[in-house]
Image: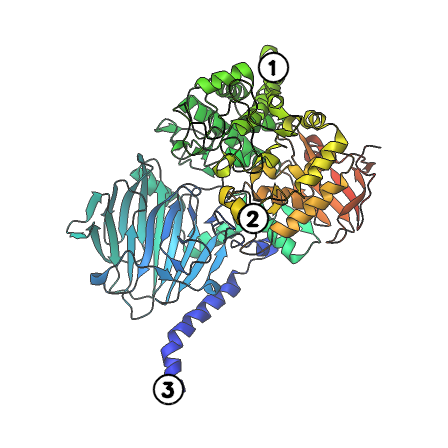
Amino acid sequence: MIQPFKILKKYRRLLFYCCIAFTAEAQENPSGNLKYVDLTIGNVGQLLEPTRPTIQLPNQMIRMFPERKDYLDDQITSFPLIVVSHRLGQAFSIKPFIKPVASVNYDEKLTYDHDLEITRPWYYSTYLIDDDVQVEFTPGKKSGIYRFSFPAKASKSLLFNLYNGGEGSWKFISDREIMATETYHDDIVVYMYGVFSEAGKTGIIDDSKTVSEKSAKGKKVKAWINFPDSKTDKIEFKYAISYVSAEQAKKNFDNELKSAEFEEVKRNGEKIWSGVINQIQVEGGTEAQKRSFYSSLYRTYERMTDITEDNQYYSGFDKKVHSSNRPFYTDDWTWDTYLAHHPLRIILNPAQEEDMLNSFVSMYEHSGWMPTFPVLFGDHACMNGFHSSVTFLDGHRKGLRNFDVSKAYSGMYKNATQATMLPWRNGPKCELDDFYHKKGYFPALRLNEKENVSLVDPFEKRQAVAVTLGGSYDDWAVAELAKDLGKNADYDIFKTRALNYKNLWNKEEKMFLPKDNKGQWVAIDPKFDGGMGGRDFYDENNGWTYKWQVQHDIEGLIRLTGGKQNFENDLDQLFREGLGRSKYEFWAKFPDATGLVGQYSMGNEPSFHIPYLYNYTNAPWKTQKRIRFLLDVWFKDNVFGIPGDEDGGGMTAFVVFSSMGFYPITPGKPEYTIGSPIFEKVTIDLQNGKKFTVIAKNCSVVNKYIQSAKFDGKVLKVPSFTHDQLVAGGTLELEMGPKPNKKWGLGE
């Protein structure tokens, strides 16, 4: 028989650390709107990538999350010192080790308990349940602090390793200091300088061999430090990162951490996050809606990131270090972010958006091309389109001027006339681009026809319809900025190119369908043909989604469909049309088309604007119905609460806008279309000192339909308002009810 006191003795250590963890949880509960931010929302992906519980300061370089498969995984592989780029890699791993150093095992995973994990934007804590070790982390801008609480009588070690396959190095300057390098993406050296709270015995391993020296270089070098004489159970590791030099890493450390303590850095992080999260105040709504809203707002600050260090920065666009008195931002995927992420930032922090646009201009200066997916190593050849052009136009039309607009236009013009439009390819144009410029559409191959252009990516294919439609929008942006800058000849050229989308409209099928290089239609099933992700013709989605990819000329698209009533009917059918096959068969070919409602895919960016298109018909109330339904169904406040790849703020910006009740349906046009707010009152503190307010009287889960509206006290009969009205500190007043007012929004 097991005696009760033996059970207590056996588990007292576990109980002790559980008490610590639960006490910490109580202490870490933040106030204000921060209490609604849940980093675990979306941590289990439906089919593709989950969100990560990313700990960082807003838009800053140091990012961390526990390295694991996703939230379902109960083991952590390691903890990165920095996430170098969103979903594109980490540098320098650290992990605690409680066994004797002689048995050091870098591959041993760390089992944790989800319920003992604390995730805040500025603070992370987890309890390693097999090892009785608590791990804590708090970030600075270019620095971070890890704190490890070890069992009293255990061996106390920290293990360091590399994530990437290039050369790295470790050097113990003393028994309390370490320097390291790791090569990221073949040629970028990431530098680290760190200090331990106590002196320890150090060691370096090259592959599986122990190195007698205090430093080593190689592709498989690792390091460890053991604290055999520690007088405390807590070991802290403070460090800083640089992309410039080892000396700069030390300077970054001195600038941020030389005299700072863990709790001080943590409090400062909470204060900074409080400032950005509380910039938007809401009243009403459910607790779940507030959690989804503020958690989404937090996500929008994951990217872009400021990599400037003491007025200098490393640019992957020319592999050089540059001096600048302005922040240099990178890590952006414009195919995702031009839709809602950049427009949201224009409202919340226009000066920061100007710095980001200025960074785009600098990238053009460094590389000779305007970026599409700017990351640390340069422009990541990804997706299709030159949507940075739309982002420039949107900023300019909304009053942003603190960047070189003329040079930005030069880059936009060069991309539009000299760069290849091929998906996942950078560089000069090829014969397919010449065809596009001459004929006004990207030519497709016929079903099962062998590719004859070597530059085409063998997996991503031509995406002929998607490229044509995206190119039309981008060319519209070039045309509109040309007009603003008085470049009338350019405007005439590009306003014609902006209508190229019409060349692929098949009036019999009422779809955008591919043509071959002879101008003949390619007969396809727009629901299912085109290979993986429909990439022969579309991109990640099928023809039912791409039917609506004409944000820049909605009236023109309405005319193509045969008028407002046909347009409305076709929208209705989109949400009702069956897959024509099982879900598993459909998703085996279109895994990105998640969050399905009929043929509508809430889980992918090309769909974001579609439910708002009802505002251009005689039934704006259907926008209100659809938006509420989509938010309620697909954006829950739990680990499954993101329907697709969130992409570092690209999708959650849609949630922020839609929850507030309006949306930038056409970036590049300084106006917003109205949906259905989920809160009774939304107040945005603008950077100009004014407040923009949305009041939705009687708003509730049931009362989702707009009965009447006013803007600044004047009756509003159309479902839109301008950016100028917003930044002037306007007030949108909506009277809400349980049934639609089918006459509101018609302009009558």
Residue most toward the left?
A: 212
| Element type where label 2 sits in the image | loop
* x 59%, y 33%: residue: 546
Mark 3: give few (<14), some (14-19) or many (20+) Cα within 10 Å: few
Q: In which quarter of the image is residue 729?
A: top right
Say which of marks 2 and 3 sits in front.
2
Q: Residue 491 carries which label?
A: 1
Tell me: residue 698, above or below residue 164.
below
- Residue 398 shows in the view: no
Which residue type does callout 2 highlight? Ser
Lateral position of residue 136 relative to residue 742, left or right: left
Q: Mark 2 points at which residue?
A: 582
Q: Earlier in the sequence, mark 3 or mark 1?
A: 3
The residue nearer to you, when weighing 724 against 267, is 724
- Measure how far apart labels 2 and 3 are at the Cα level: 55 Å
- Residue 465 shows in the view: yes
* x 40%, y 81%: residue: 8
Task: Say which quadrant the C terminus sits in.
Answer: top right
Tell me: residue 361, above or below residue 539.
above
Spot occupied by residue 9 in the image (x, y as percentages of width and height): 37, 80
